[in-house]
Image: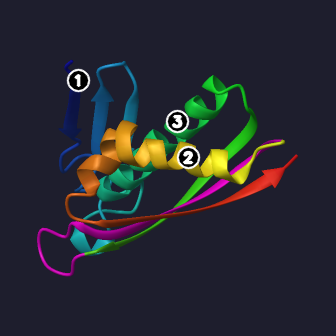
């Protein structure tokens, strides 16, 4: 299974000296920019923020899919990620906490906990990659709607 993405620097004529546009293999476009202290203008997320956001999306996707396949009445899923990075280059993630807020009707906490566990232990490739350098922790709450 392959995946493609093309990332292009907008160059010195672009909106900032460190803006990039990524075009994904599925035909979507997204922007990235650097921090002002690195030559950017803070016009878009930083590349490492995109990595963190992608990981949150990957695991949230898994949790919702697992719950839906189990015929549970899931209505919402939010993941708040808090990450720490190394202070020296490469500034890899060293710790990430995933706090899930899952809402639905009659969702049992143990079922939600199991779905989160399956995502992190078996299905989420982004979490598996980041777990090579970061201590991964999870917490969750279930909200009845």
Q: Secondary structure at mark 2?
A: helix
Residue placed under numbered mark 3 in the picture: 61
Given the current orientation, which residue lies at the most extreme left position? 89
- Quarter of the rendering occupied by the N terminus: top left
Residue placed under numbered mark 1 in the picture: 3
Categorize mark 1 by other alpha carbons within 10 Å: few (<14), some (14-19), many (20+): few
* Left or right: 4 in relation to 65: left
> Image height check: is 108 above or below 92?
above
Looking at the rendered image, the disc whose residue lies closer to the viewer, 1 or 3, is 3
Please report the residue visible at 20 percent of the width from the left and 37 percent of the height from the top: 8
Separation of residues labelled 2 and 1 (CA atoms): 29 Å
Please report the residue visible at 34 percent of the width from the left and 49 percent of the height from the top: 127
Q: Position of residue 38 (x, y in %)?
A: 22, 70
Which region shows up in magenta? 86-105
Of 83 and 31, which appears nearest the observer?
83
Q: Position of residue 94 (x, y in %)?
A: 27, 71
Please report the residue visible at 77 percent of the width from the left and 44 percent of the height from the top: 107
Separation of residues labelled 2 and 3 (CA atoms): 14 Å
Instruction: Name the mark on residue 102.
Output: none
Q: Majority secondary structure of the magenta segment?
A: strand
Of 73 and 15, which appears nearest the observer?
73
Looking at the rendered image, the disc whose residue lies closer to the viewer, 2 or 3, is 2
Is residue 31 highlighted in magenta? no
Residue placed under numbered mark 2 in the picture: 114
């Amino acid at each position: 299974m392959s995946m493609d993405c093309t990332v292009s620097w907008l160059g010195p004529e672009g909106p900032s000296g460190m803006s990039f546009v990524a075009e994904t293999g599925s035909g979507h476009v997204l922007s990235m920019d650097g921090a002002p202290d690195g030559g950017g203008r803070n016009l878009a997320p930083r590349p490492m923020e995109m990595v963190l956001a992608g990981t949150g999306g990957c695991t949230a996707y898994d949790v919702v899919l697992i719950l839906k396949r189990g015929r549970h009445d899931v209505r919402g899923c939010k993941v708040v990620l808090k990450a720490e990075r190394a202070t020296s280059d490469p500034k890899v993630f060293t710790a990430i906490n995933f706090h899930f807020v899952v809402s639905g009707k009659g969702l049992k906490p143990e079922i939600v906990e199991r779905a989160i566990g399956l995502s992190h232990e078996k299905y989420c490739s982004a979490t598996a990659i980041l777990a090579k350098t970061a201590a991964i922790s999870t917490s969750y709450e279930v909200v009845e709607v």
